[in-house]
Image (cartoon, helix red, strand yellow):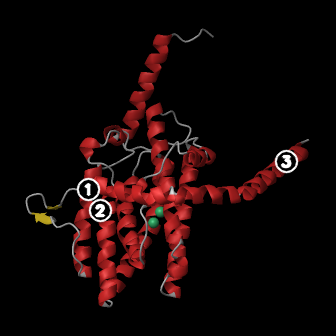
């Protein structure tokens, strides 16, 4: 067979790209082993990796509160939520495997610092009210993003989101239920609820990412339907849905500039202070040197015997098949 000329290769690449984009525009899914442009794979890898870190690092601070829950029922609920988050990390590792992004690489890049996780995950939890506010606001913000990802273009990613969203809904409800109990409790409990709302409202808005005009990959991400709506659109949805929830609790809105805009049919809100959060996290991290990363490294090392046992079992199965075939 004659070797392919450079011109022919370029034409084929162009055709493949055109076909790929047509498929995405038509709302069809991209499945594992299908051809995909390198930048699509890179964006997918980045999104999945960050989501895996959010699930697996994000469950850590909540686990510190298992021994301090106010009732046995709350303990059971919190344990179930933490287990769900670990499960979400596993589903997403499974999705990443289908796109040839090995679990070992995602973990190694986290441990080496090559792929850092969001500093939002280092924000520290101070009270039981924070556990309520996290479920309600942080998981609530994640739902806004994840619901839209049920229609993302990468098939396994979209399908994984169906179950994840169902479980995240439960997380939001349990968080809001903690807030209701505190808001209807003593003056001290009400204050705890208000403080937690004030602490976690702004980080929740930051989950949606930088404003659209500063988000460098947003355009490509939307072109490939790896993101269905812009950061600002999803953030606005969250802002709008949170106002009546705060009113129902009878708490004060942390944003003093929140105001209904009749013309836009949305709430106008104040500016997000992006520097404030990073300076709080930096001050905390300078004392503790990213303790959640250290903890992840430690637990991963302690679990090495499980991986070795799995590997040995797999080898045995292969050998057994080979012996049977011989
Ligand atoms: Fe989750
Ligand atoms: Fe969650």
Rendering coords of residue 300 (x, y %)? 65, 56
Whether label 2 touches label 3, CB < 8 Å: no
Residue 242: quadrant of the picture: bottom left
The image shows residue 39, relative to residue 222, as above or below, that is above
Q: Check disc 3 and report its element: helix, strand or loop.
A: helix
Residue 238: quadrant of the picture: bottom left
The residue indicated by pointer 3 is 321
Question: If the image is split into quadrants, where does the C terminus sit?
Answer: top right
The residue indicated by pointer 2 is 202
Q: CA distance from mark 2 to mark 3?
A: 56 Å
The residue indicated by pointer 1 is 273
The crowd level at tag 3 (other Cα within 10 Å; few <14, some 14-19, many 20+) is few
Dot 3 or dot 1: first in sequence order is: 1
Residue in view at x 42 percent, y 74 percent? 131
Q: Check disc 1 and report its element: helix, strand or loop.
A: loop
Residue nearest the viewer, comparing 115 with 309: 115
Q: In the image, is the residue at mark 1 within 8 Å of ligand 2 by its beta carbon?
A: no
Residue 281: quadrant of the picture: bottom left
Dot 2 or dot 3: first in sequence order is: 2
């Amino acid at each position: 067979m004659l070797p392919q000329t450079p011109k022919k290769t370029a034409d084929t690449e162009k055709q493949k790209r055109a076909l790929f984009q047509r498929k995405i525009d038509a709302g069809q899914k991209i499945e594992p082993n299908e051809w995909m442009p390198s930048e699509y794979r890179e964006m997918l890898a980045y999104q999945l990796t960050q989501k895996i870190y959010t699930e697996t690092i994000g469950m850590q601070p909540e686990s510190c509160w298992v021994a301090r829950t106010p009732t046995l029922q709350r303990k059971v609920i919190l344990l179930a939520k933490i287990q769900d988050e670990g499960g979400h990390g596993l589903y997403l590792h499974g999705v990443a495997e289908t796109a040839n992004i090995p679990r070992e690489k995602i973990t190694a890049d986290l441990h080496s610092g090559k792929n850092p996780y969001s500093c939002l995950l280092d924000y520290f939890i101070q009270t039981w009210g924070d556990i309520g506010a996290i479920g309600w606001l942080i998981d609530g913000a994640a739902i806004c993003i994840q619901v839209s990802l049920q229609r993302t273009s990468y098939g396994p990613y979209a399908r994984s989101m169906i179950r994840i969203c169902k479980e995240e809904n439960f997380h939001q409800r349990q968080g809001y239920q903690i807030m209701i109990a505190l808001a209807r409790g003593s003056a001290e409990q009400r204050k705890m609820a208000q403080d937690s709302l004030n602490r976690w409202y702004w980080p929740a808005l930051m989950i949606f990412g930088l404003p659209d005009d500063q988000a460098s990959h947003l355009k490509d991400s939307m072109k490939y339907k790896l993101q269905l709506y812009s950061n600002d659109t999803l953030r606005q949805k969250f802002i709008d849905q949170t106002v009546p929830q705060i009113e129902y609790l009878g708490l004060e809105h942390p944003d003093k500039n929140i105001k209904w805009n009749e013309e836009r049919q949305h709430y106008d809100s104040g500016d997000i202070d992006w520097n404030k959060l990073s300076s709080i996290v930096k001050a905390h991290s300078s004392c503790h040197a990213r303790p959640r990363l250290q903890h992840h490294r430690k637990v991963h090392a302690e679990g090495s015997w499980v991986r070795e046992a799995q590997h040995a079992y797999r080898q045995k199965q292969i050998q057994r098949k080979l012996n049977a075939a011989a």
